[in-house]
Amino acid sequence: MDIRPRRLRRSPAIRDMVRETTLTTKDFIYPLFVKAGKGEKEPIDAMPGQFQYTVDGIGEEAGVIWELGIPSVILFGIPDRKDAVGSRSYADDGVIQQAIGAIKERVPDLVVITDVCLCEYTDHGHCGIIKDGDVDNDATLEVLARQAVSHARAGADFVAPSDMMDGRVAAIRKELDARGFQNRGLISYAVKYASAFYGPFREAADSAPQFGDRQGYQMDPANAMEAIKEALLDMDEGADMIMVKPALPYLDIVQRVREICLLPLMAYNVSGEYSMVKAAEQMGWIDGERVMMEMLLAIKRAGADLIITYFAKDAARRLNPAKT
């Protein structure tokens, strides 16, 4: 008897019927960059098709995202001014706080996640408070907790600390609960590597460090067991979801975290992964749409429940052409 696996690949209908992994628009979270000012939609050179929006335009963009069937966004802010302690990150009139209100007014059911970190708000570009030339872990926790509370007060559904300070999940959860925000969720960038794939994001968010680098607090790309340790710690501290970042160079990590994690698992398809595809597509070297879908499928197949991706709108249009 001949074994012929090709029988199950014979037609599109058969392939659809036996497909093991599927993508839907519900899998996607779309990142948005919001800056101070009015009436602007500024292209991000390093990320073709991505923009910095001002608050007065973010509601309209949220409406487009919702109509495409994408259920959630994650917000990154570019403030009107920066200082050593990132004070604009927790201001009631801060750019993210205003953006949350504008989005919720336009699309109340869109799930709004906010990035909680100081790198976009500090004049030195690091993710925490600098003391004696280094990031002070415990002093940073107080500011991160204050930032998270301000986002919850403005209406965020989830806060997502990306700073990689030790103990920040517990510190933020404690402060949210103490302030009456027990029902607001916390998504931990539990497994965040010190990656070269973040380059385009640092242009988009104006967040490059002014000295040194972030290898002292983000994870070493060589380490896998440490990823399990970080995920377990953040689950114990009260995270509602866990994230691995970046996605594609760390699909093995996504799979390993999936095996030990009972929480919803996210993976962040980061700016460098996006920009490489866009650049190769512009040069005519690849079919950008097919590569995009293959990448997203690989992330889902590795075990991610949700994918933060700059491809979300493009992928949604491909999955649901009737909505375009």
Image: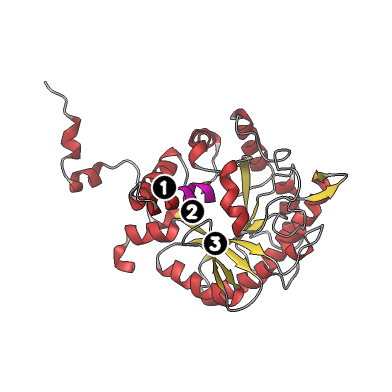
Where is residue 213? Give x, y as percent: 71, 43
SS of the residue at dot 1? Answer: helix
Where is residue 47? Give x, y as percent: 51, 57
At horizontal 41% and vertical 45% (from top left) the residue drawn is 295
Q: What secondary structure characterizes most of the magenta part?
A: helix
Discs 2, 1 touching: Cβ within 8 Å: yes
Q: Which residue is mark 1?
A: 296
Q: If the image is split into quadrants, where does the N terminus sit?
A: top left
Give the label on residue 44, or none: 3
Tell us which disc is closer to us: 3 or 2: 3
Q: CA gap, disc 1 to disc 3?
A: 22 Å
Q: Residue type at mark 3: give it.
A: Ile
Q: CA gap, disc 2 to disc 1?
A: 9 Å
Q: Is residue 242 visible?
A: no
Q: Is residue 242 left or right of residue 23?
A: right
Disc with the residue nearer the chain's start (2 vs 1): 1
The residue carrying pointer 1 sits among few (fewer than 14), some (14 to 19) or many (20 or more) residues within 10 Å by Cα, namely: many
At horizontal 52% and vertical 32% (from top left) the residue drawn is 256
Q: Is residue 228 left or right of residue 89?
A: left
Q: Which residue is mark 2?
A: 309
Vertical position of residue 154 compared to residue 239: above or below: below
**Residue 39 drawn in magenta:** no
State the extent of the magenta-drawn residues as a range. Answer: 269-276
Q: Is residue 249 visible?
A: yes
Quarter of the view holding residue 68: bottom left
Tell us which disc is closer to us: 1 or 3: 3
Q: How is the image coloured?
A: secondary structure
Quarter of the view holding residue 86: bottom right
At horizontal 76% and vertical 47% (from top left) the residue drawn is 211
